[in-house]
Image (cartoon, rainbow, N blue to C red):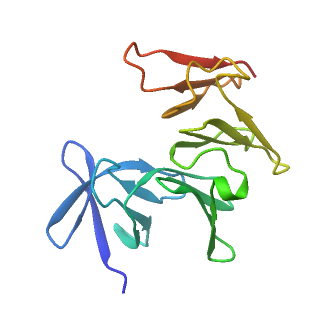
């Protein structure tokens, strides 16, 4: 059974359901959102007509999400999930399928449609032809194989954060 949620703001973006308030950690352009990843049980919600949101999932360990138009990509504590919107089905991508990381902390889609994923195994890119490229400290300019944040500049430069005490970030030229 799906519960209907009301989106509102009180100093921060949050959702309210049955009297509980959860901060929203990320919102995809499609209107899909995810609650605070620091919470013991984050939720994914989707925009519904009007101001209501519909509860679609409740899974601990969801860290990030992005919408590429055809799929919603969710970084989790157990790999990557891809929700195919047209087929209403999902695919789990983990180390068993050749993906280099089990924990995916950052997900972003750049202006060219490339999907970028950061986690405990470095940085991965899935291009428009569905070809994977994996970047690690050993084969690129990454400071660490732990990637917890990704930003892509207008010129295509990719910046990653690594959770390092000195705040170091890495830069990958386009």
Residue 109 x, y percent position in the rendering: 64, 43
Q: Residue at x 71, y 26 (%)?
A: 156
Left or right of 60, for residue 147: right
**Residue 137 or 7: which is nearer the viewer?**
137
Q: Residue at x 50, y 33 (%)?
A: 149
Residue 168 x, y percent position in the rendering: 47, 15
Q: Quadrant of residue 119?
A: top right
Residue 57 x, y percent position in the rendering: 42, 71
Residue extending farthest to the bottom is 1
Residue 69 x, y percent position in the rendering: 66, 57
Left or right of 111, for residue 131: right
**Residue 120 or 65: which is nearer the viewer?**
120
**Residue 75 or 136: which is nearer the viewer?**
136
Q: Quadrant of residue 155?
A: top right
Residue extending farthest to the left is 19
Left or right of 39, for residue 55: right
Q: Residue at x 72, y 18 (%)?
A: 173
């Amino acid at each position: 059974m799906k519960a209907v949620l009301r989106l509102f703001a009180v100093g921060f973006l949050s959702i309210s359901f049955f009297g509980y308030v959860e901060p929203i950690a990320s919102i995809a352009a499609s209107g899909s959102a995810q609650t605070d990843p620091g919470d013991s049980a984050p939720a994914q919600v989707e925009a519904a007509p009007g101001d209501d949101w519909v509860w679609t999932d409740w899974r601990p360990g969801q860290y990030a999400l992005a919408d590429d138009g055809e799929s919603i990509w969710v970084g989790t504590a157990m790999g990557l999930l891809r929700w195919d919107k047209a087929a209403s089905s999902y695919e789990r991508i983990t180390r068993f399928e050749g993906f280099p990381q089990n924990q995916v902390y950052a997900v972003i889609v750049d202006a060219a449609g490339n999907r970028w994923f950061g986690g405990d195994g470095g940085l991965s890119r899935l291009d428009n032809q569905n070809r994977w490229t994996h970047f690690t400290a050993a084969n690129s300019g990454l400071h660490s194989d732990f990637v917890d944040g990704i930003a892509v500049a207008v010129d295509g430069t990719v910046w990653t954060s690594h959770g390092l005490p000195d705040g170091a970030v890495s830069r990958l030229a386009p």
